């Protein structure tokens, strides 16, 4: 055990001993001086701190010091009543403060009690209670603010964790201070009771047991009682003052001394007014000018010195410090390396769309981004990286763009004072500004608030601008989720799975598959909009087939077949039927014959004429399916599925290609067309 721990434990044992064992007067004097020193040290520490959490041990320390002081009171009371002596310190304070007059001593002691109990302790208790209540009420808002800054990219995960911990510590601290302030109040009450006991029973003991006259007994025990009361109330007063300082340090960033000088004596005009007031007070009243003139002159000289010194505001000081820090960063060798960082996801907008992200103007984009990340985690099983949100003056005022890994993936324009109305079909008679819905490319119109009700009556789908942009972000992230899944993100998913299925993970990686090979399989699933949330089934399939092949394309096919129930539920309609476009046997044989096998894997090498014919037939069937207002789904045999997908994904990226092995046996499949060539 460390020496510091032993010292603290010994101090607690000493407090218990003072309550039981009689101490000699010389030891009591030493402990009284120690008590005053500790109280003074606590007061100075509370004045020198910049924020309350720098003195987080204060509530516990307050309890220990209060117990120490009460233990001293018990020991001195025992010594006064039993021996008529409490040490040189108590006797010196009693003699010095009373000045030979017991009534004066009692009055001084009473004033100290009133100052501590009525003024300082009462105020500190109230401030502690209010601070604890408001800190607890503000805790959810602070947590949301931290999450918003994290999603906006203003802070990192590490900074967010530190800030959350600080918020929790502040809540615990002010809650503890609310209770600790009751110790101070109880200590003041106990001090009054102990003084009355010492005085009354001291006089009785002096008269009955020691045979002293009542006057001599009253003088002797009154002096000891006042001395004991004052030596206990002075440190109690210092501790009460420190308590008030700690709980009132709410809106300051410096220590108490620097803040007083900076804030109280920073305005020269106020010093001039105070100097003139003091001077006129001495001139037109009976107050001696010898007293008022020096004070007025001191205030005026201070005002002149401040007015000659250029004022530096807090914002200017912060800007200056930021510029100095930036200059130092530019000189450092790491400054160029920091410029190489590319954000995974960026959302940039013109200055006209600032209200979207500004909470003070009612913007909720940050909260919507949080919900988008949660939604994609549930739908796709991937943790989307933090979305960096920033304004860009190079864009048009109402324009925005979405970038992934530094590349622009989508863009659009918004009219914040309008609504986006999408037609249900038929004749379009609504007044508005023609535009294209950015997420799905549908024709739409920007309409005003006055036309909104009419549009809803006519069957239009009416959407507000924040919903338009959040939907666009969601669709872009869905379409490019496979690009956001790298090896590091894959490692995080594997580590999460390993917490519950360690044996399964050990059977797959690092042998026979590396993290990079697992990442390729997962990326191929995401590219075809297959959720990877069910990692257990995915790894079961990889464990079964990874020993036969390490080709990511083939492994992805095996995993898709293992996820047959999930894929079926994804596309089947309410009637448990699936309308599909099947691929003819002739086309499948042509694709199979065009597959080339190499040592690095297999690929499709088809005659351009044949591939063009297949694509034209596929396009015709998809168009007919769309005219029937049915979602086009292509169905073929497992042997050619991935090659047919390679052939069609460039031209029909959003049309799913399924194989027979990816469908549940109880699903009714209805063929609405056939892909065939002459």
Image (tube, helix red, strand yellow):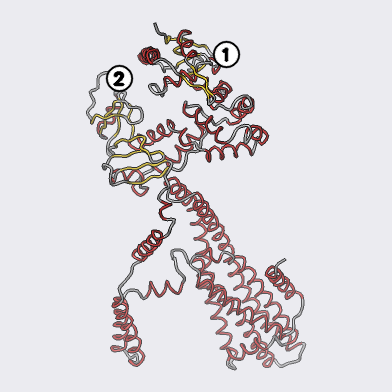
**Residue 439, quarter of the rendered image:** top left
Looking at the image, which is closer to me, 444 or 202?
444
Looking at the image, which is closer to me, 642 or 34?
642
Q: Is residue 452 left or right of residue 327?
A: left
Q: Is residue 122 above or below residue 666?
A: below
Measured as percent of width and height from the top left, residue 273 is found at 29, 79
Q: Earlier in the sequence, mark 1 or mark 2?
A: 2
Name which residue lies at 49% across and 20% down: 642
The C terminus: image quadrant: top left
Between label 1 and label 2, give the one nearer the viewer: 1
Q: Is residue 226 above or below residue 429?
A: below
Disc 2 crowd, CA 10 A, few/some/many (<14, 14-19, 20+): few
Looking at the image, which is closer to me, 491 or 234?
491
Q: Is residue 561 above or below residue 342?
A: above
Given the current orientation, which residue lies at the most extreme top position?
Answer: 678
Q: Is residue 240 left or right of residue 471?
A: right
Q: Which residue is mark 2?
A: 425
Q: Which residue is mark 1?
A: 665
Q: Is residue 166 above or below residue 482?
A: below
Name which residue lies at 53% across and 77% down: 114
The answer to whether the residue labelled 1 contacts the one labelled 2, judged by CB atoms less than 8 Å apart, is no
Name which residue lies at 42% across and 42% down: 387
Measured as percent of width and height from the top left, residue 464 is found at 33, 35
Q: Is residue 358 left or right of residue 108?
A: left
Q: CA distance from mark 1 to mark 2?
A: 37 Å
Q: Assign a secondary structure to mark 2.
A: loop
The N terminus: image quadrant: bottom right
């Amino acid at each position: 055990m460390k020496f510091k721990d032993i010292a603290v434990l010994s101090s607690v044992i000493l407090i218990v001993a003072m309550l039981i064992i009689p101490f000699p007067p010389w030891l009591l004097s030493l402990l009284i001086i120690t008590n005053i020193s500790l109280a003074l040290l606590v007061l100075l520490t509370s004045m020198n701190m910049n924020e309350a959490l720098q003195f987080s041990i204060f509530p516990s320390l307050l309890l220990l010091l209060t117990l120490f002081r009460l233990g001293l009171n018990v020991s001195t009371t025992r010594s006064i009543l039993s021996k008529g002596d409490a040490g040189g310190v108590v006797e010196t304070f009693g003699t010095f403060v009373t000045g030979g007059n017991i009534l004066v001593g009692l009055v001084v002691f009473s004033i100290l009690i009133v100052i501590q109990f009525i003024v300082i302790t009462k105020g500190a208790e109230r401030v502690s209670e209010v601070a604890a209540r408001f800190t607890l009420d503000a805790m959810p808002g602070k947590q949301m603010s931290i999450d918003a800054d994290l999603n906006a990219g203003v802070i990192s995960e590490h900074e967010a964790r530190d800030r959350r911990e600080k918020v929790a510590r502040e809540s615990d601290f002010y809650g503890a201070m609310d209770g600790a302030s009751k110790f101070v109040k109880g200590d003041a009450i106990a001090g009054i009771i102990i003084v009355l006991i010492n005085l009354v029973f001291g006089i009785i003991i002096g008269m009955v047991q020691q045979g002293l006259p009542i006057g001599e007994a009253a003088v002797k025990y009154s002096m000891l009682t006042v001395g004991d009361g004052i030596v206990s109330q002075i440190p109690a007063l210092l501790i009460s003052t420190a308590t008030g300082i700690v709980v009132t340090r709410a809106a300051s960033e410096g220590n108490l001394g620097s803040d007083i000088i900076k804030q109280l004596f920073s305005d020269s005009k106020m010093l001039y007014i105070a100097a003139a007031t003091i001077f006129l007070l001495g001139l037109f009243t009976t107050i001696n000018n010898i007293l008022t003139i020096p004070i007025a002159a001191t205030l005026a000289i201070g005002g002149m010195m401040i007015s000659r010194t250029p004022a530096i505001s807090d914002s200017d000081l912060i800007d200056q410090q930021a510029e100095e820090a930036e200059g130092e960063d530019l000189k450092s060798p790491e400054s160029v390396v920091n410029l190489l960082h590319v954000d995974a996801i960026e959302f940039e907008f013109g200055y006209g769309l600032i209200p979207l992200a500004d909470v003070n103007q009612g913007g909720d984009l940050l909260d919507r981004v949080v919900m988008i990340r949660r939604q994609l985690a549930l739908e796709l099983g991937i943790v989307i990286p933090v979305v960096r949100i920033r304004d860009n003056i190079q864009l048009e005022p109402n324009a925005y763009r979405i970038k992934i890994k530094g590349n622009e993936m989508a863009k659009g324009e918004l009219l914040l004072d309008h609504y986006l109305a999408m037609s249900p079909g038929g004749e379009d008679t609504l007044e508005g500004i023609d535009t294209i819905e950015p997420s799905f490319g549908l024709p739409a119109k920007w309409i005003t608030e006055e036309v909104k009700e009419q549009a809803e009556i006519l069957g239009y789908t009416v959407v507000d601008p924040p919903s338009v942009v959040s939907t666009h972000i969601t669709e872009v992230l869905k379409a490019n989720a496979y690009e956001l899944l790298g090896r590091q993100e894959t490692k995080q998913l594997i580590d999460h799975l390993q917490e519950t299925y360690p044996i399964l993970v050990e059977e797959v990686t690092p042998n026979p598959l590396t993290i990079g090979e697992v990442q390729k399989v997962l990326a191929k699933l995401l590219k075809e909009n297959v959720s990877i949330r069910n990692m257990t089934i995915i790894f079961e399939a990889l464990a079964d087939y990874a020993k036969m092949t390490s080709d990511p394309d083939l492994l992805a096919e095996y995993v898709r077949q293992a996820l047959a129930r999930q894929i079926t539920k994804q596309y089947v309609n309410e009637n448990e039927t699936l309308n599909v476009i099947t691929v003819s046997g002739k086309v499948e044989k042509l694709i199979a014959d065009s597959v080339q096998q190499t040592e690095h894997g297999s690929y499709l090498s088809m005659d351009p004429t044949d591939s063009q014919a297949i694509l034209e037939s596929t396009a015709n069937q998809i168009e007919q399916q769309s005219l029937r207002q049915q979602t086009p789904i292509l169905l073929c045999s497992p042997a050619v599925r991935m090659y047919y997908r390679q052939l069609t994904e460039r031209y029909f990226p959003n049309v799913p290609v399924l194989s027979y092995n990816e469908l549940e046996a109880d699903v009714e499949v209805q063929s609405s067309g056939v892909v065939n060539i002459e």
